[in-house]
C-alpha cells in the first residue's frame, strides 16, 4: 500500500500542476492590438489585359494575282498613298485590252445597225407609196414595217452592248489599278503576311497582306473585367498597370470605354474595358500583357482599422467555456452584424461598426463607437511563449 501511495502522490501532483498551468493560461491571454488611425484608402479592381494600338488597319488585296514587288517590311513607316506592294499587272493589262476590243466591236455593231436601220426605213416608206398606188399587197408593207422596226431594236441593242462593254472596260481598269497596293493612312507596319512570288487569292475573304498601326505613341489596354467588378468601373477613372518586360515601371492611363458586349469563356463572363495610355517612351509593344489596377474608390483622411480586426473572434467564444467568466460581457458577443473588439483597461469591448471601402490592408469605418487612437484587437498570444523568445501563437479565429 505504501508503494502505491508513493507512486500515486507524485502523479496526482503532476496532474494538478498541468491543470493549473493550462487553466491559468486562459486567464493570462494577452491580446495583440493595433491603433485605430486615419489615412488614405484606395480601392482597386484588378484585371489582365493586352496592349494594342488605338487604330489598326489591315491592308488586303481586292484582286487575285502574284506578288511581284514589296516596298515595305516590318517596322517600316508609311505615308498615306504610299505604294507598299505590287501584284503582277500583266494579266490585268491583257484584260483591259480585251475590254477595249470588245468596246470597239460594240461601237462598230452600232454603226452597222444604224446603217441597216436607215435602209429599212427607206424600204418601208417606199412600200407605203407602192401600197398607196396598189402596186404591192398589204402583206408586203407589213413585212417592210417589221424589218424596219427590227432594225430600230437592233440599234438599241447595239447601244446597250456599248454600255456593257464600257462597264467591262472600267472594271478591267479598276482591277489593273488595284494591282498597286497603297497605304490608306500614316503609320507603322507591324506585320507582313506575304512574300514576293506568293499568290494571293481574293474570293469571299480579302487576303491580309499588311497590318498597319496608325500610331504607337497613343496605345490602349484591352482588359477583361469580371462581371462582379464591372459595376464599380466607370469611364474617366484612373488606372495603372505593369508589364513583364519592365517590372519596375508603373504605367498610368484612364478608362475611356466600357464595351457592353459580354465575353463568355468557360462560363466566366467578362467585359472589355479600354484604357488609354500615353506611350511616348515607346516602351510598350503591341501584344504585351498588362496587369492592370483600376482605381474605383478613394477616401482621404479616413478612419480606418486593419482588415484582420474584422475577422477576429475571442478564443473564449470559440471554446465555449461557460464556467469561466471571460473579460467581456457575453450578451454583447451575441450581437449580429459587423463588429470589432476594442481593448479598454485590459478588457474586451465589442463595438458594432459600419464599414466603407477597403483595400488590401485597411477598411474604412463610417459609423461606430470608436475614436482615433483606440486599441483594436487583431489576435491573441500566450505570454510565456513570448517570454521564451518563441513565435507568437494566435488564438483568435476568423468568423467567416
Image (cartoon, rainbow, N blue to C red):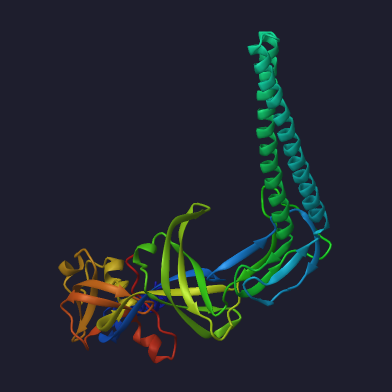
251 w.r.t. 269: above or below: below
Q: Is residue 156 left or right of residue 48?
A: right
The part of the image, by quadrant, that contains residue 235 is bottom left
Q: Position of residue 169 (x, y in %)?
A: 72, 49
The quarter in which the C terminus is drawn is bottom left
Q: Is residue 146 visible?
A: no
145 w.r.t. 23: above or below: above
Total numbered labels: 0
45 w.r.t. 150: above or below: below
Pick the residue in front: 135 or 365: 135
At x 37%, y 74%, the residue is 237
At x 42%, y 66%, the residue is 257
Q: Position of residue 351 (x, y in %)?
A: 19, 74
The quarter in which the N terminus is drawn is bottom left
* Residue lying at the far front of the rendered structure: 133
Q: Is residue 7 visible?
A: yes
Pick the residue in front: 179 or 2: 179
Pick the residue in front: 155 or 275: 155
At x 21%, y 63%, the residue is 336
Amino acid at each position: 500500500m505504501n508503494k502505491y501511495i508513493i507512486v500515486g502522490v507524485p502523479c496526482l501532483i503532476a496532474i494538478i500542476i498541468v491543470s493549473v498551468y493550462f487553466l491559468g493560461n486562459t486567464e493570462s491571454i494577452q491580446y495583440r492590438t493595433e491603433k485605430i488611425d486615419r489615412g488614405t484608402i484606395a480601392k482597386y479592381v484588378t484585371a489582365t489585359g493586352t496592349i494594342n494600338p488605338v487604330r489598326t488597319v489591315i491592308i488586303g488585296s481586292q484582286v487575285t494575282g502574284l506578288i511581284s514587288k514589296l516596298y515595305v517590311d516590318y517596322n517600316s513607316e508609311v505615308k498615306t498613298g504610299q505604294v507598299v506592294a505590287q501584284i503582277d499587272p500583266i494579266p490585268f493589262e491583257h484584260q483591259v485590252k480585251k475590254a477595249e476590243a470588245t468596246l470597239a466591236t460594240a461601237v462598230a455593231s452600232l454603226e452597222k445597225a444604224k446603217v441597216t436601220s436607215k435602209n429599212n426605213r427607206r424600204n418601208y416608206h417606199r412600200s407605203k407609196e407602192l401600197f398607196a398606188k396598189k402596186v404591192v399587197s398589204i402583206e408586203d408593207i407589213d413585212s417592210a414595217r417589221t424589218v424596219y422596226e427590227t432594225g430600230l431594236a437592233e440599234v438599241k441593242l447595239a447601244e446597250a452592248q456599248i454600255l456593257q462593254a464600257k462597264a467591262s472596260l472600267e472594271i478591267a481598269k479598276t482591277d489593273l489599278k488595284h494591282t498597286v497596293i497603297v497605304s490608306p493612312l500614316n503609320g507603322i507596319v507591324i506585320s507582313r503576311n506575304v512574300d514576293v512570288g506568293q499568290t494571293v487569292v481574293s474570293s469571299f475573304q480579302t487576303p491580309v497582306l499588311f497590318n498597319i498601326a496608325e500610331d504607337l505613341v497613343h496605345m490602349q489596354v484591352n482588359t477583361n473585367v469580371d462581371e462582379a467588378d464591372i459595376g464599380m468601373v466607370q469611364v474617366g477613372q484612373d488606372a495603372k498597370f505593369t508589364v513583364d518586360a519592365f517590372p519596375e515601371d508603373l504605367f498610368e492611363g484612364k478608362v475611356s470605354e466600357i464595351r457592353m458586349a459580354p465575353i463568355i469563356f468557360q462560363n466566366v463572363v467578362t467585359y472589355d474595358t479600354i484604357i488609354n495610355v500615353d506611350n511616348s517612351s515607346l516602351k510598350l509593344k503591341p501584344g504585351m500583357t498588362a496587369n492592370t489596377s483600376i482605381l474605383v474608390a478613394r477616401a482621404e483622411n479616413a478612419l480606418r482599422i486593419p482588415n484582420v480586426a474584422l475577422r477576429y473572434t475571442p478564443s473564449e467564444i470559440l471554446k465555449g467555456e461557460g464556467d469561466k467568466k471571460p473579460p467581456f460581457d457575453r450578451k454583447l458577443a451575441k450581437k449580429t452584424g459587423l463588429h470589432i473588439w476594442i481593448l479598454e483597461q485590459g478588457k474586451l469591448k465589442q463595438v458594432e461598426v459600419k464599414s466603407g471601402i477597403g483595400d488590401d490592408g485597411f477598411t474604412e469605418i463610417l459609423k461606430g463607437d470608436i475614436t482615433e487612437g483606440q486599441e483594436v484587437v487583431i489576435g491573441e498570444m500566450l505570454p510565456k511563449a513570448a517570454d521564451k523568445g518563441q513565435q507568437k501563437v494566435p488564438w483568435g479565429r476568423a468568423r467567416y
